[in-house]
């Protein structure tokens, strides 16, 4: 459960995205901890957004107590185009080093068709297996979070839902609810929106119905003080050991 919560938090920490009339770059650093004191890891992201293109790079690694049980480092990148019709991702590349092992996942998308290169391949693709239709209907993980952040930012409300395919698993991320407030930490000081954050496995998992029913609802805080974008500032997900929290440590924006 803790590892799954960390994965969800990692995904949520990627959500720093904008709709802009010029090139903008965002550099974000987050800390991940349980109960605010037990360190689990860190994440850093660089997001470049223009009127026609976007690119995201991410690094995630376990640290502190979590590193005693699961030494993980993830490097991921994605890119694609931006148009009036929305986002169209073209390439996603992820390198995952864990417990002395290594896996590389590359997804390419052309004419709506997704091709995957995964080495080593998964011995179990879950039940049910994610289909070609699932893949066509989904974003890669980083592009999905880009799209979700744009939805929240453009609506200035907790309204957004995206489908994701990562080479094996197919799932939905969604936000709902909403309350307004202020946030003043990690380099951001201004209005913020607190949303419910949901992670829903759909295909490519090995989970019972009871396990799916126990997936907790998280709480995400987005910045709403800089126009048509929403920056993730904080994400909290309940775990058996207490709340696991991703929180902004350093926020930079340049254009």
Image (cartoon, helix red, strand yellow):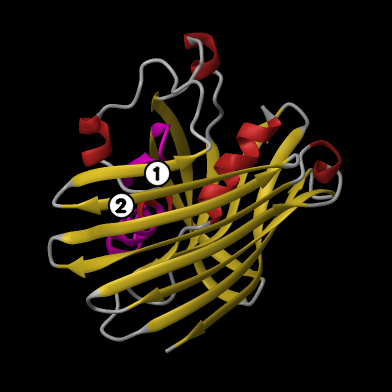
The vertical placement of 183 against 68, above or below, is: below
**Of 204 and 99, the residue lying toward us:** 99
Secondary structure at badge 1 equals: strand
The reply to whether the magenta stretch includes residue 150 is yes
**In x, y percent, where is residue 1?**
66, 27
Residue annotated with mark 2: 108
Q: Quadrant of residue 115?
A: top left
**In x, y percent, where is residue 107?**
36, 49
Q: Residues within 10 Å of mark 1 (few under 14, many from 20)?
A: few
Q: What whole-number distance in Å separates the C-alpha atoms at marks 2 and 1?
A: 9 Å
The vertical placement of 218 against 20, above or below, is: above
Q: Residues within 10 Å of mark 2 (few under 14, many from 20)?
A: some
Secondary structure at badge 2 equals: strand
| Residue depicted at 75% across the width and 39% down the height | 99
Stretch in magenta = 145-170
Q: Are the two marked residues, 2 and 1, in contact with CB atoms closer than 8 angstroms?
A: yes
Residue 255 visible in rendering: yes
**What is the tally of numbered marks visible in this picture?**
2
Residue 162 visible in rendering: no
The vertical placement of 199 against 181, above or below, is: above
């Amino acid at each position: 459960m803790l590892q799954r919560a960390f994965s969800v938090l990692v995904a949520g920490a990627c959500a720093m995205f904008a709709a802009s009339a010029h090139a903008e770059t965002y550099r974000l650093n987050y800390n991940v901890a349980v109960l605010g004191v037990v360190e689990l890891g860190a994440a850093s992201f660089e997001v470049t957004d223009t009127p026609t293109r976007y690119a995201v790079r991410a690094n995630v690694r376990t640290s502190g107590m979590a590193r005693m049980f699961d030494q993980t480092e993830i490097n991921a990148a994605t890119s694609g185009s931006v148009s009036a019709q929305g986002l169209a991702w073209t390439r996603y590349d992820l390198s995952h080093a864990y417990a002395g092992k290594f896996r590389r996942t590359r997804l390419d998308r052309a004419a709506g068709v997704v091709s995957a290169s995964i080495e080593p391949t998964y011995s179990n693709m879950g039940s049910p297996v994610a289909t070609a239709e699932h893949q066509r209907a989904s974003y890669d993980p980083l592009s999905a979070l880009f799209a979700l952040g744009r939805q929240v930012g453009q609506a200035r409300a907790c309204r957004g839902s995206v489908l994701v395919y990562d080479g094996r698993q197919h799932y939905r991320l969604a936000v709902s609810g909403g309350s307004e407030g202020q946030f003043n930490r990690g380099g951001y000081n201004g209005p913020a929106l607190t949303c419910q954050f949901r992670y829903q496995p759909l295909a490519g998992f090995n989970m019972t119905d009871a396990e799916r029913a126990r997936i907790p609802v998280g709480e995400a805080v987005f910045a709403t003080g800089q126009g048509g974008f929403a920056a993730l500032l904080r994400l909290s997900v309940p775990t058996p050991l207490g709340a696991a929290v991703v929180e902004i440590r350093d926020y930079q924006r340049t254009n």
